[in-house]
Amino acid sequence: MDNQKRDFLSLLLTTAVAAPITIFARVTFAQQMGRRAPGPPLDPLSDPSAQPPPFDPKKIQEHNQKTILEDIQKLYRLAGELKDEVEKTDSRNTLSLAMVQKAKEVEKLAKQIANLAVG
């Protein structure tokens, strides 16, 4: 299989796996933060006294810290799996699809951790 097909299939598989996870994570995060899940907006005229929830940076930082710790544990596990995959693969001839996928997962998770750490 040539590299373009391999890259396309890898991207397609990653997207197929990541899309439902992203949707689930957004809904879960919205529920944890006490907000509605994404959907049609509420009618602001129905309750004129309704105020948006106050912005609390400490809660957001605490949530980010917990998420970072969980993601670092996942990253450590994925890095170990990637190491095992590299040891099983003879990289002189070809790279295994599983190894490429693990590397992309590690890269994605590392970027996510960096983004959370920044802000």
Image (cartoon, grey):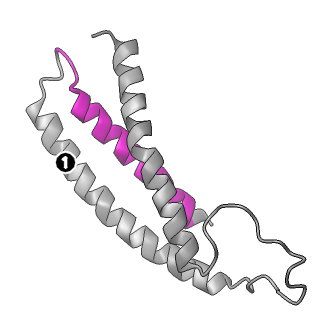
Residue in view at x 52 percent, y 82 percent: 62
In this rendered view, identify the residue nearer to me: 54 or 3. Answer: 54
Residue in view at x 58 percent, y 71 percent: 30
| Quadrant the C terminus occupies | bottom right
| Quadrant the N terminus occupies | top left
Instruction: Confirm whether the magenta stretch covers residue 101.
Output: yes
In this rendered view, identify the residue nearer to me: 47 or 17. Answer: 47
- Identify residue for label 1: 81
- Tell me the amino acid under the disc marked 1: Glu
Relative to 65, is 56 above or below? below
Relative to 98, is 116 above or below? below
Q: Position of residue 81 (x, y in %)?
A: 19, 48
Residue in view at x 86 percent, y 80 percent: 46
Q: Position of residue 61 (x, y in %)?
A: 57, 79
> Is residue 28 shown left or right of residue 86?
right
In this rendered view, identify the residue nearer to me: 11 or 16. Answer: 16
By secondary structure, the bulk of the magenta-drawn segment is best described as helix
Magenta residues (range): 93-117
Relative to 14, is 108 above or below? below
> Is residue 44 shown left or right of residue 94?
right
In this rendered view, identify the residue nearer to me: 21 or 1. Answer: 21
Residue 118 is at least partly visible in this image: yes
Residue lying at the far front of the rendered structure: 46
> Is residue 35 shown left or right of residue 97?
right
